[in-house]
Amino acid sequence: MGSANGLVSASGRQPLLSFGVISDVQYADIPDGRSFLGVPRYYRHSIVVLQRAVQKWNQQKTRFAINFGDIVDGFCPKEQSLDAVKKVVKEFDIFNGPVYHMIGNHCLYNLPREQLLPQLRIPSLDHIAYYDFSPIPEYRFVVLDAYDISAIGWPKDHPKTQKALKFLQEKNPNLDKNSPNGLVGLDRRFLMFNGAVGEEQLEWLDKVLLDATKSNQKVVVCCHLPLDPGASSPEAILWNYEDVMDVIHRYNCVKVCLAGHDHKGGHSIDSHGIHHRVFEAALECPPAVDLPLPISLESGMDVYLPSKVMWGGVCDVMYKLSWKSWHPP
């Protein structure tokens, strides 16, 4: 059974809506390199991955797209940072629909919040970067600011910077606060390239989920940093993921939490049946890739998720949530 946008749902029914996803483009006009784990990174090619994703989203007439952060890499020469961000945003602008951005650590290595947020057109008050939107009455999307409390992005003398530095000093004994050496298990998340959701944002999240519950809406939570240890390496998780999930678990409206940051990707189902999906990094899509990979679907009570979403995708929201992905040629 086909649909108007060429997509077929897991159940054969036309989806309520489709939307594009991509994470960790991390473009930079520099030679290819490797991560600290030795994984190849294709800095110039990553923008080509984005271009192909936008083309696919337009072909399939997706309703909107979500960028899960880190559009420019931290190794981008600082004198090129603003132009690099503008270059990547220009590629997103080719998409025939709204694009919802969130910030990541690499974004903040390049530009402070007061410069970055206007470029990403993130609705902001006092340079905060959390918001929600409802593309159809049945669903609400919540975008969290994972670097609300952070040692990067805010001015050095800002209270949130000072709070983050004090927290890291207490949690991470290493001189290099990006090093997990000596940290065990989930304590390995206490690194400077991660961050936390502040109290005001937690209160806001609670109000949004209460309102969604009263409005009989299902909710998709989006965050650059993963929110469940089962879906991510411990080094990549939000500092206070437990506080965020305590709020989420008060309600039955959240069906899935989506994230980036942990480049290898991942999937889990938490104790409340909420699916957590971490998307693979566009930065690590090899230029030589030329064939699509098959997608195997994992079924759940409220969500259908593929076992792998490679470097850009299209998501279908149905009466049950189903997911389709594409592998760039």
Image: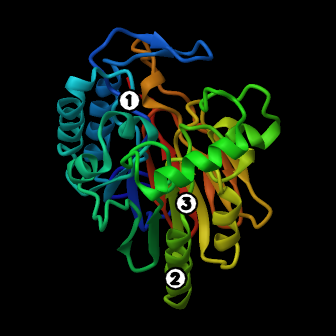
Give residue 197's mark: 3
- Assign the C terminus to one quadrant of the image: top left
* Observer-nearest of 226 and 180: 180
* Observer-nearest of 322 and 26: 26
Rate crowding at label 2 as few (under 14), some (14 to 19) or many (20 or more) other CA atoms within 10 Å. few
Mark 3 or mark 1, whichever is nearer to me: 3
In 3D space, how far apart are the residues under numbered discs 2 and 1 (Cα atoms)?
33 Å
In 3D space, how far apart are the residues under numbered discs 2 and 3 (Cα atoms)?
15 Å
Q: Secondary structure at mark 2?
A: helix
Give residue 207's mark: 2
Q: Residue at x 29, y 27 (%)?
A: 47
Q: Quadrant of residue 299?
A: bottom right
Q: Position of residue 12 (x, y in %)?
A: 53, 59
Q: Position of residue 313 (x, y in %)?
A: 44, 42
Q: How is the image coloured?
A: rainbow
The three-letter amino acid code for the residue at tag 3 is: Val
Q: Residue at x 28, y 20 (%)?
A: 77
Q: Secondary structure at mark 1?
A: loop
Residue furthest out toward the front: 157
Is residue 235 rendered to the left or right of residue 96? Answer: right
Residue furthest out toward the bottom: 214
Q: Are marks 2 and 1 in contact (CB under 8 Å)?
A: no
Q: Residue at x 49, y 88 (%)?
A: 215
Q: Quadrant of residue 87?
A: top left
- N-term mark: 2 or 1: 1
* Observer-nearest of 284 and 327: 284
Q: Is residue 166 visible?
A: yes
The residue singled out by tag 1 in the image is 26
